Amino acid sequence: MAGLEPYQDELLGTVTDDGSGNWLNLLAAKGFRIHPHAKGVEFEIKYAPRSGAHGELGDYAQRLLAPDGLPEAVLAPSWLVFRDTTVEYWLLDDTEWSKQRTSHRTDVLKRKTHRIYREPITGTPLVQSTEDFLTDPDRIAAALGDFDGSAGMMHKSRAKGHYVHLAAGIVFNLVESRCRTHETEQIQLELEYGAHLHHKSQTPAPACTHAVLRTHLWWLHHLLKPRFDEAGLAPTIERKRDFVQAVRDQHT
């Protein structure tokens, strides 16, 4: 498979929002093919501010995605989408359950389990999660009926953009999130594997194992590490469920 270098102008120029808030939808309409290589599995490196003033939502993401000084192997379209949601959490053993209402006024219940991997040389943590969803109201009610009570509600605001690794043909997501519960705020940046990408005239890349996807993500982390350092961000393993549970424990 050839890389995406011949299509840089198309990738950078496809930024007009079609109303979906999804840049990959725009690429698909322009002749690109999107293939997630691990459906139902999420790979992400999380970062949190070390200290100091944090600015407004999107400030970190805009700084990290700025085109000036990006490594030659990576590009970032001028695309940043904002979204607000309210999420209710349940914590049961090692499983995280969360329910949120979509823009269509229907509920989605997500079940998520996490495992933390560390890069063998540097120890950089990576969170790998398996998730699935329930959308049928009766099944959601039946699932929640087994729980004693929720850990609480959390309001989440996010700004989402993307990096593209041209040679590998991979889209990575960069998500800045600000979550609040009981007047306490968690600020995080997440660098996530999004999907493999190729033009319709190309042959798709062979499927990657989970280990290879983790390696791709660590590679991008090290390539962009000077940017994260300059922004005052450091890797963290705190998950949303950890934040909600810690705040709940402070108020009970």
Image: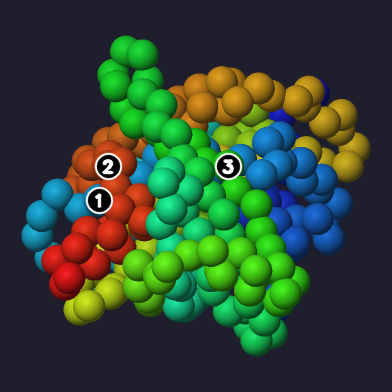
- Extreme bottom residue here? 105
Q: CA distance from mark 2 to mark 3?
A: 19 Å
Confirm or deny contact between disc 1 and disc 2 (CB under 8 A): yes
Judging by the rendered image, the residue that carries numbered circle 2 is 236
Residue 65 shows in the view: no
The kind of secondary structure element at disc 2 is strand
Q: Position of residue 95 (x, y in %)?
A: 47, 48
Q: Vertical placement of 181 versus 24: above or below? A: below
The kind of secondary structure element at disc 1 is strand
Judging by the rendered image, the residue that carries numbered circle 3 is 130
Callout 1 crowding tier (Cα within 10 Å): few <14, some 14–19, many ≥20: some
Amino acid type, residue under disc 2 in the picture: Thr
The quarter of the displayed image where residue 157 is located: bottom left
User: Which residue shows up at 63% across the image and 37% down it?
Assistant: 170
Q: Vertical placement of 3 versus 27: above or below? A: above
Q: Position of residue 46 (x, y in %)?
A: 35, 45
The quarter of the displayed image where residue 55 is located: bottom left
Q: Position of residue 73 (x, y in %)?
A: 53, 31
User: Which residue shows up at 50% across the image and 44% down it?
Assistant: 113
Precedes in sequence: disc 1 or disc 2: 1
**Residue 105 relative to residue 190: left or right:** right
Q: Vertical placement of 135 versus 122: above or below? A: below
Confirm or deny contact between disc 2 and disc 3 (CB under 8 A): no
Amino acid type, residue under disc 1 in the picture: Ala
Q: CA distance from mark 1 to mark 2?
A: 6 Å
- Camera-nearest label, 3 or 1: 3
Q: Which image quarter holds the C terminus?
A: bottom left
Judging by the rendered image, the residue that carries numbered circle 1 is 48
Q: Vertical placement of 88 versus 13: above or below? A: below
Q: Position of residue 210 (x, y in %)?
A: 60, 26
